[in-house]
Image: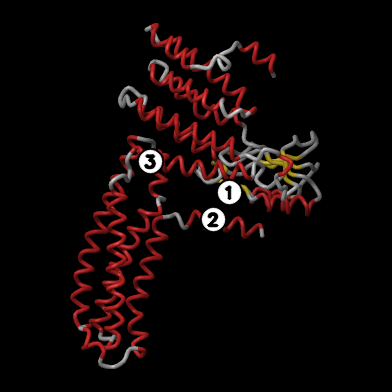
Amino acid sequence: MAITEKWRFLFSRLKRRMWFRASLYGALGIVTALLGAVAQPLIPHGLAGSIGAGSVGNILGILATSMLAVTTFSLATMVSAYGTASTTATPRAARLLIEDTTAQASLATFIGAFLYSIVGLIALSAGIYGDSGRVLLLAATIAVIVLITVTLLRWIEQLSRFGRMGETINLVEDATRRAMQHRARNPWLGGAPYRPPPEDGTAVESGQVGYVEYIDIEQLDRVGRDGGFDIHLQALPGTFAVPGRALAAVAASALDDDQAARIRGAFIIGDARTFEHDPRYGLVVLTEVAVRALSPGINDPGTAIDVIGTAVRLLAGWSQGRANREDEIEIAYPRVFVPALREEDMFDDVFPPIARDGAGMREIGIRLQKALAALDDLGDARFQAPLRRHAREALARAQATLDFVPDLEAVRAAGRPALLQAPSDVVDER
């Protein structure tokens, strides 16, 4: 079962690659074009002449020429959109554009239709169809034309927003929301709440340099059950792993090489962070978009305000989606102890960079204070400490930067007094 889960993750990554869908559609187009030669005995003799199936060659020629042009144009448009997103938003968001299923399906449909037409023309020239086979080829060609028409209409709609700033932010928000919802339902990834390993435990260090992309908790639980020990995770998805840094600590004085290898094998380490199992990465990418928009070369505070609102939606969804009682969450793998995401870290991913680069802008300071007040309205106890800290820090940055007194007073007035109270009061409440 552990192998199944791991391969399911790897396959989910594979099917998001652009060449995978294009190859699948291309193979389907080739099979469809050759279907007429195989199924021609099913068509009544003489039907081809009555419906004009002999003209299918001309139609295929037009289709092949037009699909080649449309495919080339689509590729050029997509490459341009990737470059635009990397320049105006952040290069980390371009990956979501590349993995966009609508764009991939459109391009794959055009490639599949092109290959269908080419194979159909070759088969016609070779004379493998016969009159009955031409009837099936004509029917398939009509179906392909209908599919192309529908795809073109969807692709035209997609092109109107593909690679635009708003669409890029929406893609990042959707990817982050999915990761947050998954983690809210599984705060310990199916394992048990974290507890520190014993002092005489054994650390299993990374043998690679890169980011943890996925952890097979079921495999770790199996290793623990086979060896009769507990495993305490020291690295979550998104952690930068290097040789010498522990991935996990085992409640055993010694491990054999096979056990250590199986534990390392449960961690998939790649060159970059991913959105799927790393909710904080989505927040980091959104913050990069806001920081770039606040740079002097771009000077687009509206985009930064949009990102702040997006972050509030995501954090509010995180608060609402998390289980109210931790003891109600099913622990499927009791041998593995997993740290939960810390709200302090999530807040740190978003607010300090925006507050730093937008400290000299009245509208950014006001929006930050209103955003923190909106999150305070949720009444989430885990949000209280980071909310107070970031509200005070954002106001302090504005005080150090804004020279015009009315601007500073407007930022202070937008803040919630309960969040801007003195640090000593916060300590007393804790």
Q: Is residue 44 above or below residue 349?
A: below
- Could you classify mark 2 by the number of other residues whose Cα lies within 10 Å: few (under 14), some (14-19), or many (20 or more)? few
In terms of secondary structure, where does tag 1 sit?
Answer: strand
The residue where tag 1 is placed is 268
Label 3: which secondary element = helix
Q: Which residue is mark 3?
A: 168
Which of pointers 2 and 1 indicates the residue nearer the eye? 2
Q: Report the residue at 61% width, 41% height from top.
A: 184
The span from disc 2 to disc 3 (Cα, nearest Å) is 25 Å
Would you say the residues marked 2 and 1 are in contact, meaning their CB atoms lie under 8 Å apart? yes
Question: Where residue 408 appears, x then y in whole percent?
Answer: 42, 10
Residue extending farthest bottom: 45
Q: Which mark is residue 408?
A: none
Amino acid type assigned to the residue bearing label 2 in the image? Leu
* Residue type (three-letter) at the residue carrying disc 3: Thr
Badge 1 amino acid: Ile
